[in-house]
Image (cartoon, helix red, strand yellow):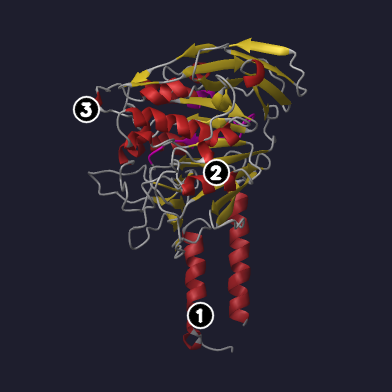
Amino acid sequence: MKGDVNSRPSWFIQVIFAAITFLSYGGRVYGGITSAFIRSEWPSVDIPFDNEAFAVPKGHNAPQQVHVTQGDYDGKAVIVSWVTTDAPGLSIVHFGTSPERYTLSAEGTVTNYTFHNYKSGYIHHCLLESLKYDTKYYYKIGEGDSSREFWFQTPPKIGPDAPYKFGIIGDMGQTYNSLSTLEHYMHSGAQAVLFVGDLSYADRYQYDDVGLRWDTWGRFVEKSAAYQPWIWSAGNHEIEYMPYMGEVIPFKSYLYRYATPYLASRSSSPLWYAIRRASAHIIVLSSYSPFVKYTPQWRWLREEFKRVDREKTPWLIVLMHVPIYNSNDAHFMEGESMRSVFERWFVLNKVDVIFAGHVHAYERSYRISNIHYNVSTGDRYPVPDESAPVYITVGDGGNQEGLAGRFRDPQPDYSAFREASYGHSTLEIKNRTHALYHWNRNDDGKKVATDSFVLHNQYWATNARRRKLKKKHYLTSLVGQILAY
């Protein structure tokens, strides 16, 4: 088939064009995938109150809604939280490294709140400090025959090659689809959850049912959250601004129930904070708190980026609720205000990946940025940027509002993969240079990752010049093979 280029078949021209595209976008072939998969989902209605998924533990004043989260900056402390309904009881956690042999104890605090006419149970938060890394701890809460026992595993010591597997869940709610997400996640082998906001969706109810739906959700996730830390961030459904009920304090239920280690990272609010875990530095932002220049969140983030040490924690991960890049009609461009304030910092600090929720679908971006946006010069489009994060939306946990199935057409160049299905993600950090990312669709027990890729660390990545040389050699070889055909 040798001869003039004009005699080449159409596929030849297409391959050459693809190679040029590959070079133009720094090795990434743009023009992403919009999955045509349609799931026969369960109805988007909440599970009834009397369902076994919300079962109240047996015994008088037995602890319920048990959950743990990281309790310090470096992973050597845990906050254990639970609720008792009949009386405050003892706010004490007995714990140790052997089952039923509790050589240590810690005393916590107890509080409660009202929401309209609803009065919460007694909410306990107890900090367990000075824990050993990479150790399994057993703990007991409650009194007498009503006491309950659980366990958790501390992370490995902070270090650049400490392996760790995170799960990522968002916009969960408490439907049968939510239950499917939770059960699929619990078979993933992940060691902690990065939760990107919108927990219970209790704000879709009125009066006493708001508080009751917080209670059911706490019992619903206990089967996972009592055994491994869920790293919390708040979404719009946590705001609960309801003047018609006399409730005008934002985030009231969430802040009473879900403690975060914000003081350990010098934050002034539980809604934004940072932790270090294994080889990851995780920054949690609040999409619904002031973040423009000179606000407390803006000042805190500026200082927190200075504390990031990529020699010790090479993986820099950011959590937020509203996605900065989104090609779904649902909540389109809502993240633009935060993008205009923080995107330059994300690129300058070489953030590896940013997880968001809010949009009830899944979407992954290429590494792109729009930091040169300028209303005067006309520069207004995102461009490939090797220093930019990958943006991933995982607002597909299963809540009663249903899926966001209307993606914008055509698919933008920055969008790599998108699908309107329920699911969860995992990020498995292997070492300082590589991590494996999977998005897993809740496909009736199917365990094969629907979308996956190898995430290369931004700080410890191969030298840029060597990467460029490898691409050049690859393309030279590819074109040579084509021409020789």
User: Where the C terminus falls, by quadrant?
Assistant: bottom right
Q: In the rendered image, is residue 285 in sight?
A: no
- In the foreground, 2 or 359: 359
Identify which amino acid the numbered label 2 is placed on: Leu
Q: Nearer the viewer, mark 2 or mark 1?
A: 2
Label 3, on which residue? 244
In this view, 479 is above or below 210: below
Label 2, on which residue? 182
Q: Nearer the viewer, mark 1 or mark 3?
A: 3
Q: SS for tag 3?
A: helix
Label 1, on which residue? 11
Is 411 left, or right, of 166 in this rendering?
left
Identify which amino acid the numbered label 1 is placed on: Trp
- In the foreground, 286 or 210: 210
Q: Position of residue 211 (x, y in %)?
A: 38, 27
Identify which amino acid the numbered label 3 is placed on: Tyr
Contact between marks 2 and 1 (CB within 8 A): the answer is: no
